[in-house]
Image: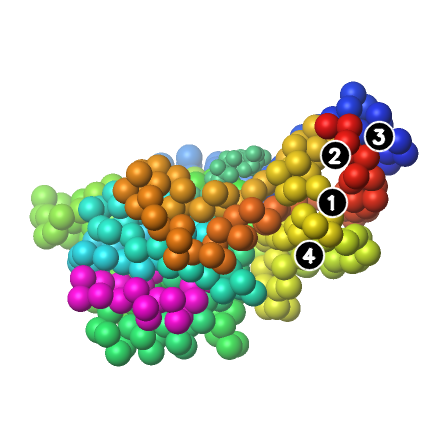
Amino acid sequence: MLNTMSKHTLPDLALFGGTPLFAEKRFVGRPNLAPTDEILADMRQILDQRWLSNDGPYLKGFEAMLCQSLGVKHSIAVSNGTIGLELLIRALNLTGEVIVPSFTFIATVHALQWLGLTPVFCDILPETHTLDPQSVAALITPRTSAILGVHLWGLPCEITALEALAEQHGLKLIFDAAHALLCEYRGRKLGNFGHAEVFSFHATKFVNSLEGGAITTNDDALAERLRLMRNFGFVDYDQVEALGINAKMNEVCAAVGQSSLRHSANFIAHNRSNYRLYHKQLAQIPGLKLLPLPESSNFQYLVLALEQTEFGLSRDRLVQLLHAENLIARRYFYPGCHRAQPYAQLYPAAGAHLPVTEALAEKVLLLPTGTAVSAEMIEEIGELLGFVQSHAAAISAAI
Ligand code: T4K
C-alpha cells in the first residue's frame, strides 16, 4: 500500500522518525511474472508427463525459443548464469589471465577465480560502464588467453574494437550478457557475438526461470562440447566422453522461462514506460543523472549517477535515507570486484588502474523498476527525491 506523499518538513522523513513513504519494502529486482494460471498449467503438465529434468520437452522448447528470439544457432540452457560462465571458460580451455571489468556482479570474476584463472581487472568507459578497449589493449600479456566483456545494464560492449583486439592477439572473446537479453549491437541481438555469450535468468532478471541461465553461440563444435559438459560428459547410457558437471536446467525452470520469455515484450514495454516516467520526474533534480539507454534496450535496470556537490548529499547518505522510507535502492556494483575478497587481498593495488570504476562505484545507485513498479510509485519517488535534494543542507546538518 502506498501512502500519499507527505514529506513537507524534515521530521516527516522516516530517517527522523516519520512514517515511511512505502508501507512495504520496494525492491530492485522484484520478479516479473507471467499470469499464475499459465504457470500452473505448465506445472500440471510437467507432473503429468513425469519428465522433470535431463533434456525434457520444456527445456528443448525454451532453448528453441531463445534461439529464435536472438537469431542465434545454439542455446544451451543451464542451472544458473554463473555455472554457464564456468562451463564456457572450461569448454574454451582458457588458461592464465583473462581481462575482465571490475565493475560487474561478483559472479563474473568469481567464475574465473573458481577455475584457477587470473582475473585482470580492466577499467571501463564512463558513458556505458563497459570495457574500455584502450585499457584492454594495455593489459594484454603473453599470459592472456581471453577477454571477458560484460554488457552491463544491457548496454553492449564496444564489440567491434574488442573483436579486433582478440583477432590481433589470438585471444578468445566471450561476453557476460546476464543483463542483456533482447538488447542489440548495431541492429543484431546480443548473444551472437564473440565465441559465446552467457545469459542469466535469475528471479531478479526481467525474464526469469526462477534460477537459470543459457550460453549462446553460433559455433557448432563449441555447442556440442557445452551440451556434453552440462550433463557429466554423457553421450549415451553408460558412455562418458568428457569431463563434465551437473549444470542442467530442470523442467520447472524451463517452463517458467518459456512463459516469462513469451511475456518479455510486455515486460520491456512496462520497463520502458517506467524509464520515461523516471526521466521526467528526475529531470529537474540537480545532481541526479539517469544513465541514457538506447531504444533497443530491455530497460531492466534504472541506473542513476549522483553528483554529491550538486545534489548536496552523498550517494550513501541518500541510500540510507531511502531505505528508511522502505525504498530499497541498491549500490550495484559497489565497491567494485577488486575491493571484494579474495581480490582485495590478492590484488591490493588494482584500484590504481581503475579510476573510472572507482569513481562510478561511489556514484551509482539503482531504483526499483519492472512490473511491480507503477507510475504512481515513480511519481512519489520523484517527489521524495526532489524534497530531499531541496532540503539537503538541512538534512546534513540534522544528521
Ligand atoms: N553476471 C552478471 C553481470 C550478473 O548481474 C549476474 C547476476 C550474474 C553474472 C550471475 O547470474 P546468476 O548465477 O545469478 O544466474 C542479484 C541476483 O541474485 C543476481 O542474479 C544478479 N546478477 C544481481 C545483479 O542481482 P543480489 O544479491 O542483489 O540478489 P537479491 O537476492 O538480494 O535480490 C535483489 C532483491 O530482489 C531482493 O532484495 C528482494 C528482491 N527479490 C529477490 C528474489 C530472489 C524478490 O522480491 N523476489 C525474489 O524471488 O543479486
Residue sitting at x 67%, y 52%: 307
Disc 4 is placed on an element classified as strand
Residue 10 shows which numbered tag?
Answer: 3
Q: Which amino acid does label 4 sit on?
A: Lys
Frontmost of labels 3 and 2 is 2
Query: Looking at the image, which is closer to me, 219 or 323?
Result: 323
Q: How crowded is mark 3: few (under 14 residues within 10 Å), some or many (20 or more)?
A: some
Q: What residue type is labelled 2?
A: Ser
Residue under pointer 2: 396
How far apart marks 4 and 2 lie (CA) works out to 21 Å
How far apart marks 3 and 2 lie (CA) works out to 11 Å
Image x and y of residue 262, in percent: 55, 55
Q: Measured along the vertical axis of the image, is residue 187 above or below residue 74? A: below
Kindly indicate whether the residue at mark 4 contacts the one at mark 1 (C-beta within 8 angstroms): no
- Apparent side of residue 19 relative to residue 297 in the rendered image (left or right): right
Query: Looking at the image, which is closer to me, 303 or 294?
Result: 303
Residue 7 shows which numbered tag?
Answer: none
Residue under pointer 1: 312
Q: Among all residues in the image, which is located at the extreme right?
A: 8
Q: How crowded is mark 1: few (under 14 residues within 10 Å), some or many (20 or more)?
A: many
Q: What residue type is labelled 1?
A: Gly
